[in-house]
Amino acid sequence: MMSVHSHPKLCPSSPTSVTDLSQLLDACLENSLPRPALHVETLAEAASILRLNDLGSYTVPSRGLYPYQWNWDAALTAMGWAALDESRAFEELKALFSAQWEDGMVPHIVFHRACHTYFPGPEIWGTPEAPRGTTGITQPPVAVIAVRHIVENSMRKGRALEEARGLFGNLLRSHRWFYAARDPFNSGSVATLHPWESGMDNSAAWDKAMANVPVDDIPPYTRRDLGHVDASMRPQQAEYDRYLTLLYRFRELNYDPNQLYHVSPFRVTDLCTNSVLQRANYDLRWLAEELGFLESIPEIDNWLEKGHAAFEKLWDSSAGIFRSWDQITDQPLDAATSAGFLPLFARAATTEQAEKLVETLEKWMDNVNFGVPSLDPEEARFEPLRYWRGPVWVIVNYMIVDGLRHYGYDSLAERIETDTCDLVNTRGIHEYYDPITGAGAGGSHFSWTAAMCLAWLDKIPANSA
Ligand code: DGY
């Protein structure tokens, strides 16, 4: 994936311990190779966090707070595992796809084994799929992107391609599911039916759409997230009541995708999901070519073509950013969020749109000390510590930087890389960060942030960060 991203050759990074890391850095010095901007201690911490959260064949995002396997966390975490142990990376993906539904959906959480620190667990979801419990909704399809990244960065490309061959059918079926279940009228963009599917649960982009979701008479419940993280960093109770309302309504219909699309009171075109899917289609096409699955290419090309055209409707030229769309009211959603820059990652922005996006992003960056905030810092709803309503997320920075480099905006990309390295080097590896103070927040010892250190930040040379 980073083929567009031409960093100078750095020290090899397959660290397993602080000792290995010191040796690697010594080797860099001896061979006059640039040192990574990431501190040796941060790399070591990243490696130890993946091992800490490793439950055998899958990795939990953060112990206690998120004790199961999450869909997009797993795929991004696999990219980190690949730097330490490539087989373990593929094992992570296989564990995720072992829970793929018959119809192709990859669920948003796989409940591999019981745990009582999370709500809502398998007994609340009550999904029909056996043998493993899962939720009945999905998440942004990062898996193909991760597979391509692992193959391209592999020291044993042939072997990595063989692993990819074993997953190709699952990956293709998961994309087919998105179009069949979430774009029945062939619009080119897919619908998201629950804020948890977007992965950006309490984004201000969902406020208007969530205001139209009634709160049903749902069974009383106790949130477990508040036992792990301060309430000021989490979604509000009114949002949780609606998350649960949607869950129970979907459960009532046995998660039948043919019905959910039509009856869900929340149905949006999410910029993150659609950008990830569009980018993943490019990477799926690449994989199909590498593996010789040429018969699937016309189908993927069709998705790419109609997907590309569908982004035009989401462009807000006066604000210089893309906006998610409420499919129920057929109106753009009002908040400008960091997902608005992800069409760069999807290669879906025109060169003029990319130029405008960069102007907007530079303005956002000037208003904070660490970019990229998840909501426009000039927005009244901006809250620097509350989950997706302001904090910096390292995985989003990764996608934005990849997009900026593709469009040739290297200095802005470097600025974001510098901020991101500063955050993890000086504040440790957290779920997210306050864009004003830099404080680490949310869950601690967080897998996907650790994975981004191992798969991305370790490749940034010290002189650019
Ligand atoms: C949670 O429970 O907070 C998760 O984000 C749902 O995916």
Image (spheres, rainbow, N blue to C red):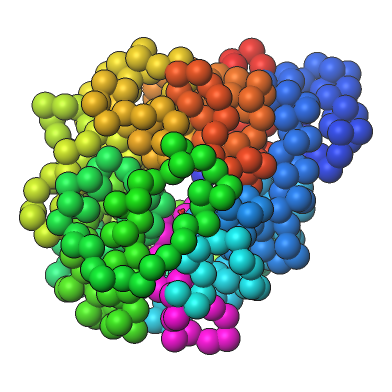
In front: 37, or 126? Answer: 126
In front: 122, or 217? Answer: 217
x%, y% of residue 463?
A: 64, 13
The correct choice, above or below, for 86 with respect to 440 in the image is below
Per the rendered image, the range of residues in magenta is 125-150
Left or right of residue 239, residue 30 in this image: right
Is residue 113 within the magenta segment? no
x%, y% of residue 106?
A: 46, 70
x%, y% of residue 369?
A: 46, 15
**Residue shown at the point (66%, 21%) measured from the top left:** 426
Quarter of the view holding residue 13: top right
Quarter of the view holding residue 335: top left
The correct choice, above or below, for 147 with respect to 129 in the image is above
**Residue shown at the point (78%, 35%) measured from the top left:** 44
Q: Name the residue furthest front.
A: 220
x%, y% of residue 407?
A: 36, 29
- One can see residue 212 in this view: yes
The correct choice, above or below, for 259 with respect to 168 in the image is below
**Residue shown at the point (41%, 27%) measured from the top left:** 384
Left or right of residue 404, residue 393 in this image: right
Left or right of residue 320, residue 240 in this image: right
- One can see residue 413 in this view: no
In front: 135, or 372? Answer: 135
Figure quadrant of the C terminus: top right
**Residue shown at the point (46%, 42%) measured from the top left:** 231
